[in-house]
Amino acid sequence: MNGVVLISGNGSNLQSIIDNAKSIDLTICCVVSNKMDAFGLKRAAKVGIPCVALDETLFDSKLGFDQEIMKVIDNYQAKVIILAGYMRILSADFISKYFGKILNIHPSLLPKFPGLNTHQRAIEASEKIHGVSVHFVTKELDGGPVIAQESVNIDSTDNAQTLAKKVLDKEHVIYPKAIHWYTQGRLKLVNKNTATLDEKIL
Ligand code: GAR
């Protein structure tokens, strides 16, 4: 299945998707970044994946920016859009157009800690368990139906950095697995807000 991956930064999730692409039946047609200096662009270029970096400061509107990404997606006839550390909120038009085809990975056990700084917030909330969620993207920020989650323990010695590392290790395993379910046609978004795997509600 053809897919486009959207990134904003380091791209360690992108790397795990690149490394697993063959075995998860995914062709990464293009990597798009909203940050010109995202390290993930180098990871993609290194293995010959076309990259597009869009300069946010050159666009007046959120929709205008997203329209450029839509052109890329349609140009490659991508059937799945994979957000991998993409830190920009998508426009409603974008989400409607590709509804049911956009996957995101978020570093918390949703519905806990949507938004930013999830690791620090989990520590400050004295949580004992934290983790990662893969979900379908809907108009609710970090609110679409959850596809898969993995948890990690928060130890008394953890800080936001050590916790992020533990969570990222889980991310790199769980995301390719969930993407594979999608490329196999086993994972679907039904009735606008329900994720199913093999026709069973997740
Ligand atoms: C990951 O932890 C990912 O879950 C998170 O950004 C990090 C990107 O790391 N995404 C979000 O917070 C989205 N709301 P990476 O660039 O090394 O893959």
Image (cartoon, grey):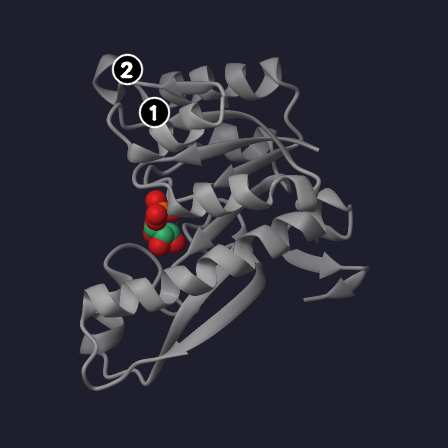
The C terminus lies in quadrant: bottom right
Mark 1 and mark 2 in contact (Cβ < 8 Å)? yes
Name the residue located 50 percent from the left edge and 28 percent from the top edge.
Answer: 93
Few, some or many residues within 10 Å of mark 2 (<14, 14–19, 20+): few
Can residue 110 be seen in the rendering of this structure? no
Residue 3 image position (x, y, % from top left): 60, 31
Q: Say which mark, if any, is on residue 6.
A: none
Amino acid at circle 1: Lys
Per the image, label 1 sits on a secondary structure element best described as: helix
The residue nearer to you, when weighing 202 against 31, is 31
Name the residue located 23 percent from the left edge and 79 percent from the top edge.
Answer: 125
Task: Name the image quarter holding residue 196.
Answer: bottom right
Task: Name the image quarter holding residue 148.
Answer: bottom right
Residue 99 vs 150, above or below: the answer is: above
Amino acid at circle 2: Phe
Q: Which residue is mark 1?
A: 62
The N terminus lies in quadrant: top right
CA separation in Å, label 2 and label 1:
7 Å
Q: Which residue is mark 2?
A: 59
Residue 124 image position (x, y, % from top left): 18, 76
Residue 18 image position (x, y, % from top left): 53, 39
